[in-house]
């Protein structure tokens, strides 16, 4: 009787592991798709924002980047992640396109959770801050195409880090 119980428990445990493995693979595929969409849409957002922002908005982004650097200097990855989310949100807000904002917002929870879940398994995100600065410099130079390309490149690199973590 006791061996039968153990055999059933082992079977349940094995089935659970297999189901979890399949679920993780599906989630990874879903995340891949979500990040590909967000990558393109945030590039568009950076392009649109560049056409509309001024010195005030650039100063806001610069201040946010200084806070990101401070969070990294203190080893506060959770705070950095919140500030990273805020940076991306601000750029989309500055694009002033409610449809674009709505579509990106529908994916924000998934991408933010993926970043938080993997943050300790990835390199310290110094590259992200450098890339964020590059996006802001393109915006400051009033080069919408460059802002788009740099944002898409940033999202592509961070997607790879997250999916490999």
Image (cartoon, helix red, strand yellow):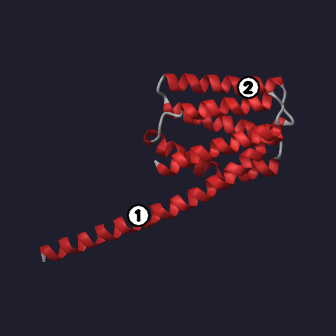
Q: Are marks 1 and 2 in contact (CB under 8 Å)?
A: no
Crowding at dot 2, Cα within 10 Å, few <14 / some 14-19 / many 20+, comes out as few
- SS at mark 2 in the image: helix
**Figure quadrant of residue 79:** top right
The residue sitting at 53% across, 44% down in the picture is 115
Instruction: Name the residue tied to disc 1.
Output: 21
Q: Quadrant of the N terminus?
A: bottom left
Is residue 39 left or right of 10 when viewed as pictured? right
How many numbered marks appear? 2
What residue is drawn where x is 69% and y is 31%?
A: 134
Residue 64 point in image, percent of width and height = 66, 26
**Quarter of image, res 2:** bottom left
The residue that disc 2 covers is 60
- Location of residue 25 in the rendering, given as x and y in whole percent from the top left corner: 47, 63
Question: How dense is the environment of label 1, judged by Cα within 10 Å: few (below 14), some, or many (20 and up)?
Answer: few
Work out whether residue 161 or residue 82 is closer to the camera in this orientation and state it: 161
């Amino acid at each position: 009787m006791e061996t039968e119980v153990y055999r059933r428990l082992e079977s349940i445990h094995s089935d659970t592991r297999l189901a979890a493995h399949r679920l993780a693979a599906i989630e990874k595929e879903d995340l891949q798709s979500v990040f590909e969409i967000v990558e393109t849409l945030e590039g568009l957002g950076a392009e649109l924002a560049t056409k509309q922002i001024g010195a005030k908005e650039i100063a806001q982004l610069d201040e946010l980047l200084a806070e990101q650097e401070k969070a990294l200097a203190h080893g506060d990855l959770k705070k950095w992640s919140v500030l990273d989310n805020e940076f991306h949100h601000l750029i989309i807000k500055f694009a002033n396109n409610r449809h674009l904002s709505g579509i990106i917002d529908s994916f924000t929870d998934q991408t933010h959770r993926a970043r938080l879940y993997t943050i300790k398994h990835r390199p310290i995100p110094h590259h992200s801050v450098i890339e964020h600065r590059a996006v802001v410099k393109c915006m400051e130079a009033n080069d919408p195409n460059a802002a788009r390309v740099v944002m898409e490149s940033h999202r592509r690199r961070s997607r790879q880090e997250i999916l490999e973590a």
